[in-house]
Each structure stands twice: as C-alpha cells, then as structure tokens.
Image: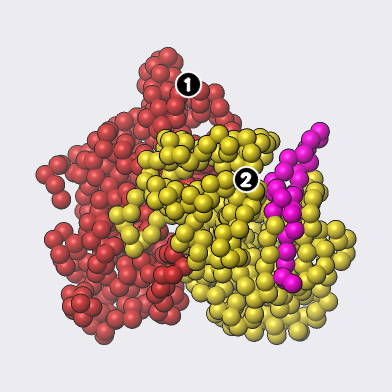
Chain colours: A red, B yellow
Amino acid sequence: MTSQPSIVSFRDVRKHFVPRGSMFGKAPRVRAVDGVTFSIARGRVLGIAGESGSGKSTLANLLVGLERATSGEIEVDGQVMTATPDRGLRRAVQMVFQDPFASLNPRFTVARSVEEPLLIHGLGTTVERRTQAIAALEKAELRPGLAFMSRYPHELSGGQRQRVAIARAVILNPKLLVADEPVSMLDVSVRAGILRLLRRLVTEQHMAMVFITHDLSIVAHICDELAVMYRGRIVEKGPVRDVLRTPAHPYTQALIDAVPIPDPAAVVRDLPAKLLAGFGDAPAALGCPFAPRCIHAVPQCEASDPPQSSVAPSHLTACIRALELRRAAQ
Amino acid sequence: MPLFELDDVSIAYHTRDSAVFAVNRVSLGLEAGTALGLVGESGCGKSTLALATLGLLPRFANVWHGAIRFEGQVISQMADADLMTLRWRRMAYVPQSALASLVPVHSIRRQFRDTAAAHGMRAAEADRRAAELFRRVELDPIVLDRFPHELSGGMRQRAIIALALLFKPPLLVADEPTTGLDVIVQRQIVNLLTNLRRTEALSLLFISHDIGVVAELCDRIAVLYAGEVMEEGPTLEVLANPSHPYTMGLARSFPDVRAPDRPLVSIPGHPPRLSEVSQGCPFATRCPFVRDLCRTDKPRKSGVGRDRSVACHFADEAPRMAEIATRPGIWEEGGAAA
C-alpha cells in the first residue's frame, strides 16, 4: 500500500460460531470470518462488500471489540486487541451504524447523544463537553452546531440524523471509523453528501475507515481499496476502480452484474441460475466456498483451498481460474 | 380507458383542527399490462398514493379532491364492502416489509388458506393454487409448511408475491418491495416481477426510491415531490433527458456501477413539511435554477413532446440546465445556476 504505518491490521483472523443446541457436534461450525488478512493505513478507506451472511458484520464486530476472534491477531493503532480491550483501544475505534432512526436514542437531545461518548470516558467538564459537541456537529456539517444541540432526533431528516451519529463517532478523535452500510437507509438524494463528509473526515482527522456495504455502485465514491467477502473469506481485494473495471473473481462479477443500472437503455446482464439460487448448504470444508454457485467451477476448485494470487499490482484474488478467465475475456 | 387512473387527486390527513395535504392535484394513469414507477424522496406522497389506490387510507385521511378510478369504477368513493370485493381479486398489494406483513405464528400455508377463505376460495383450491404459485416464484412448495421466521428475506418476499397473486389480480401495487434486500436477492425479485409481468399480463404500480430498479422494471415513471408530480413520461425518455431539475438531481445522485468516476450529486435540504404550503413551486427552496417566478407562481403541468409532461416554468431550458446539473457543486450553492 503506502509507506504510512497501518492503523489496523488483521492477520489470519477467524471467528467461528458453534450453533446453539449442537454441543455434541451435530451442526457444523459457522465460519463467519475465516482467515481474513488485511491492513489499512492512515487516511485510507477499505470497502468490504458481500451479500448478507458473507461475514461483513461479524468483521465489523471484531473490529470494534464486540466479538472476540477465535484465532488470529487484530491490531489497532499498534495495540493487539484482547478479550477485554482497554478504554484507550475502545476510544480509538468508533462505529457509524446503518439506521440513524434506530441508533439515536429518541429521548436524548442531539447534545446528549453527541456528548455521551465523552461522559462514558469521563472526559472534560460540562462546558468543555458542550464546546466539543458543538465543534463535532460543525465538523459533520450541521451548522451552526449550537442550533442543533437542543433538538430531538424526530425533528431531523434522515441525513441530518446520520450526521449527528457521525459527530458522535468522531468526537473522541478515533483512529479507526467502522461504517456499516451508513447510507443504505438514507434517501438517494442525500447519500453523496454523507459519503463526501465521511471521506473528508478520514482525510482531515488522519483516520482510517472500514466501509461495509452490499452495494458495489457506491464503493468507488468513498473507498480506496475494496475487499469482496464470500462466506467469511476475502475472495478478491484491490484498488477499488481496478476491482470494479476488471473483476477477477466470478463472485465479484456477479455482484457487479446484480446492481440495477439507472439507465433503461442499458443491457442488463443475466445472472446464472446457479448463482441466484443463493448460498445453499454449507460447502465442503475443503475447496473454494463459491464453487457450488460458480459457473466456471471445475473439479479442481473443490479439491483444495484456492490461494490468494495476484492478477495485477496489489490486486489479489482467490480463484484458481482468474488469469485463464481474464485471458479468455480479452 | 386506462386500467387505473388518478384524476386530479388530493389526499388530506386530518389533525384535530386542520388538514395537511400529502398528495396535491395528482393526475396519472396506468394502461393495462404496463408498469408505472413512482419515485421520489421519503415523505413525497408515494406510499399515501399506494394506500389510496387500494382504498386503505387510514381513518384520519381521505381523498379530498378528484377521483381514483379502477376498471372504470370510482373507487375513491366506494363503500368498504365493495372495496373488499376488489382487493386481492382485482388488485393486490406487495408491501416493503415481508416480515411485518406475514403472521409470525402461522405457517405460510395457513396464510394462503386464511386469505382464500376470506374471499370465498376453498382450502383445497387454495392449497393447489399455492403450490402452483410457489413453483412460479421459484420456491419449493415444501416451504409452504414453514413459518415466516424460517425463511430468508428473499424467500419471504417471494412468498408474499405468490400470496398476492392468489386470485390472479390484474393489478399489483408494490411499495418498495426490494428495499432492504441485498443486491443478489434484489436481482431475483426484479427478475421475478419482470417475468410475471410478461406471463401473467400483470400491471404494476411500483413505488421505489431506487431509480435503477424502476429503470429496469417500469415503462413509465412519475417523479413525485412534496405530493405533486414534477415530471412524468416514458422511463427511457425521462431518465435520458430529464426536463425537471428535481429529476436531474435525483438521476445524478444515483450511482452507476459502470461509471465509478462520474461525480455524484447530493441535493441539500429536505422536502417541505406537509404543513408548509408554498405559493410557488415546491422544489424552489432546493432548486439550483430557482428564479423569482418560481417562488411566487406554481408551475402548471405542460406537455413535453408526446406522452410526457413536466411542471417547471423553465422546462424549455432543460438541456442547458441538465448540462449544469451534472456538477455536484451547483447543488450546494442554492439558486446560483439560474
């Protein structure tokens, strides 16, 4: 990536869940995150894309310390994440949630919501907290900040609420922002503004950001790099425009083809029936997890785990046929 | 004669001592076998129109002005008992939240049977039809004996669509049926609706904020803002050459996965509250092309070419505005581009 030191790094992180009622090993373990490795430098945004059930949200929970990894190492701001992250580490990672209608307490004023992190961490005097909250609101482009302090969530539009949630997330000057589908519940007309705001904050505050989404049409407008997850694994990773223009993994291609195009004259590419059929049963322990849904799968795909290989500079994929398919497409 | 028609319809919500209008003098038509998409931000009146179409407005709301016609009958003045004979049999509803609209403690089969019984279809016939419809929506009929929580989001939405088709209604009203689903599941539902339109000769009133889905599914599009139609016409023409600045902004705020470098527009501000009644154009407060006339006079609907209409005083300058509207900065500066 760059010479900048990384703010967050994952090294072969796994998170497996044992389904309830299967103490005797009847049901297989759910491998929500299955050997994920990446790092993000200061000022950079990594997009994580995939369907529901691909492990995106578990990854977010691991990042903020809500889940504990089964194995592997997570390092944030030079500190290794442990079972009970200390306050410093908790302050360093903040989250922006999907639904600003649910993530703000309806009985709290904007002031109370935004000051809450300072209260929890016992920071500042009443006056200092208030000043900082106003400053945070203005950073989130709610100006003048003072005018929003005494308002309640129901008085705000969806976009304004998400800005309040963002102000609350950045008031502690975090090193890493984890944004889980932060614009998918908002009106399309305000999404671009929220994306630009997040991008600006990452740059100005020298943070790193993980941006989780299932919608590949927005990633180019916020991310530097994109990682596509399937069944807990990263199947493709690279500079966002490279991945979108020349996807190397058949799953990435499918996610791109699935996005509706706002142009009725465009030719919609059909998705193979095999893919539309959904995840289906858990794949065999060995081999490419996507093979059962892949139209390009050959017997070899199910024989062993596909290794990450590079198809272009810093563009990796875990598909044994990637180069062959790319040559065939040209 | 259109299958379904809104003729100068205003819909009022009544509060203790006043009324606010969620829909204002809207005229739209839907020809049999076609699909009409209603798009716009939240609070623009889309869902109110859907409910009015089905005669399901809450008690404190009513059609204040104009008429809603379906198959030649004025349904906006129809008694509940008569509406009952139309719903499910002649028009059915697919809501946004499939989970909230299925009874959580009954199997899917029971919900087919209950709906059938309420409208005079026998259980055996309902079972036969349910199995047939499940195959039609590509669900295994085994799923009929499952409970809603056992189904994935996409399966539930398909089950709801199957249920809506129980009596082969000619009109389906779908309110954001793909919102909240992830892209591949959304694709399944869009494909399914496209196929059903063809094979069942279904007409569709499709409500969505997602221009991409409407572009794929609908022949015609109506852009609503603050309860009024800003622009209406064939989807292809409206999206390729929008005549109203609001359509221009909306179309440009929607990302195109094929064009990662195209800048995205954001329309600052929000639609007016229902209680704020404007003299002029409702979009004037957010329009980068606003002029004095826009604030004082409501633009009348005027024709654009064939089969298309727009409500903007300066629609004849659309090509120039559309060019400027592609620049995100123009939207931030409020009225700077006029």
Rendered position, A281 above or below A77: below
- Identify the residue shown where x is 44% and y is 48%: B321
Q: Distance between the residues labelled 1 and 2?
A: 37 Å
- Identify the residue shown where x is 64% and y is 42%: B298
Rendered position, A117 above or below A312: above
Q: Would you say B321 lies left or right of B69 here?
A: left
- Identify the residue shown where x is 59% and y is 62%: B308
Q: Position of residue B222 (x, y in %)?
A: 59, 58
Q: Give the label, 1 or 2, closer to the camera.
A: 2
Rendered position, A284 above or below B231: below
- Label 1 environment density (alpha carbons within 10 Å; few <14, some 14–19, many ≥20): some
Q: Is the magenta stretch mostly helix, strand or loop?
A: strand
User: Which portion, as a residue range, is magenta?
Assistant: B1-26
Q: In which quarter of the image is the N terminus of chain B?
A: bottom right
Q: Would you say B289 lies left or right of A200 here?
A: right
Q: Position of residue B4 (x, y in %)?
A: 72, 67
Q: Would you say A198 lies left or right of A308 here?
A: right
Rendered position, B234 above or below B229: below
- Residue type highlighted by circle 1: Leu
- Residue B299 disc label: 2
- Marked residue chain, label 1: A
